Image (tube, coloured by chain):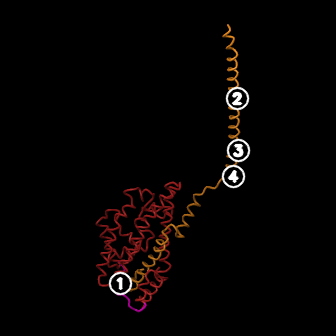
Chain colours: A orange, B red
Amino acid sequence: MQDLEDADFTTASFIYATLRCHEVMEGYVKQQFHTHPHVASVNTRHLAANFIKPDASSQAAMETKVTALSTKVDSYVSKVELLITKEKERAAAAKVKKYKGKPEEEAS
Amino acid sequence: MEFSRLILTLALRVQTQTRYLQRIKQGKLNPGLMVGWRNWKDSHSFLEFFTLSGHIDTETGTAAFSHSQKAGFTTYIEAQLAISFKNLFPSVFGKGGLSSMDDSDCLPAITNGDKWNNGSTSIHFQLMRNMNDVSYQLDSSIKKVLKDHVEARQLATDCVTASKRFVINFIAFMSQEYSTWQQRGFTKKAAWQTVCWIIRRIFEDRQSDLCQKYAGPRRC
């Protein structure tokens, strides 16, 4: 870059190089960096590098597991509902028994 | 005259310098342009003037001055500027140990995001704190050297101002990008890696542009 025999050429080269740099810088500042095409391409590369492709086999296994869990939950729900019904019936029977037994006690 | 043609070519290509074009077309070349290149700064060379290490050995500094004079540079600043065209990164980003050299995934001098911005004492804030000092130092130097050349002085001052503006925006962008990627759910390492890729890309743009166009096959 430096020419010791031709100082003018060296100076002109440096000025030219500096102004070229300023042109590149101006492009980035005008686009506020974010929207500059080169920055956008780097961001795209970053997203591609960090993208996790869904695995088909693991997805199927996950679906099976979710179905099994759903069935299990359904059976628990039906059991709980059955227990609630039985409890209600037992409470009603106890109430009837109590009501029927009262006159006999009074009579005695 | 080769110098005139070169200046005319550069002015034609660089749209931002159009106000100087008319005078150059009329053959009124400003002699201030020929004083030397030490007054012409861009973003890369602007960053070279930040002394973040805080200490340079006297022996090292003196040797650097001596070598620069032996190489034909009239001032140490000229040597610094010449080296800034050779390096991809300014020393604040690129000065690292041998183990961290040529690492495309991170910056040799800043290996993680916390070194860049930890909220108080990191390089981001060191640069911002030194910004006005460096700018004032360079402006003063330009005013002194080019006191008799109004137009060249204005052009050189514009270069420093544009460089300062770029560096301030660039620093803010780096920190913002780093935090944005973290907010999107990426780890600190992944976020800093992206920022490093962007920085590398920007400085590669600058370097490739220089090698393609500034001196042609004769010098590059």
Residue type at numbered disc 2: Thr
Depth-wise, is mark 4 or mark 1 nearer the camera? Answer: 1
Main secondary structure found in the magenta portion: loop
Q: Give the CA separation, mark 4 to mark 1.
A: 68 Å
Question: What chain does mark 3 sit on?
Answer: A
Q: Secondary structure at mark 2?
A: helix
Whether callout 3 and callout 2 share a subunit is answered yes
Report the residue marked by disc 4. A56
In the depicted structure, whether residue B147 falls above or below residue B138: below
Front residue of B215/A77: it is A77
* Quadrant including the N terminus of chain B: bottom left
Q: Give the CA separation, mark 1 to mark 2.
A: 98 Å
Residue B61 horizontal/vertical position (percent): 31, 68
Report the residue marked by disc 3. A64
Report the residue marked by disc 1. B151
Q: Which mark is residue A85?
A: 2
Q: Secondary structure at mark 4?
A: helix
Whether callout 3 and callout 1 share a subunit is answered no
Q: Secondary structure at mark 1?
A: helix
Q: Give the CA separation, mark 2 to mark 4.
A: 43 Å
Q: What segment carries the magenta color?
A: B25-38
The reply to whether the C-beta atoms of the residues labelled 4 and 1 are less than 8 Å apart is no
Depth-wise, is mark 1 or mark 2 nearer the camera? Answer: 2
Residue type at numbered disc 1: Glu
Left or right? Give the position of B185 relative to B86.
Answer: right
Is residue B26 on the magenta stretch?
Answer: yes
Crowdedness near tag 2: few (<14), some (14–19) or many (≥20) residues, C-alpha within 10 Å: few
Depth-wise, is mark 3 or mark 4 nearer the camera? Answer: 3
Nearer-N-terminus badge (3/4):
4
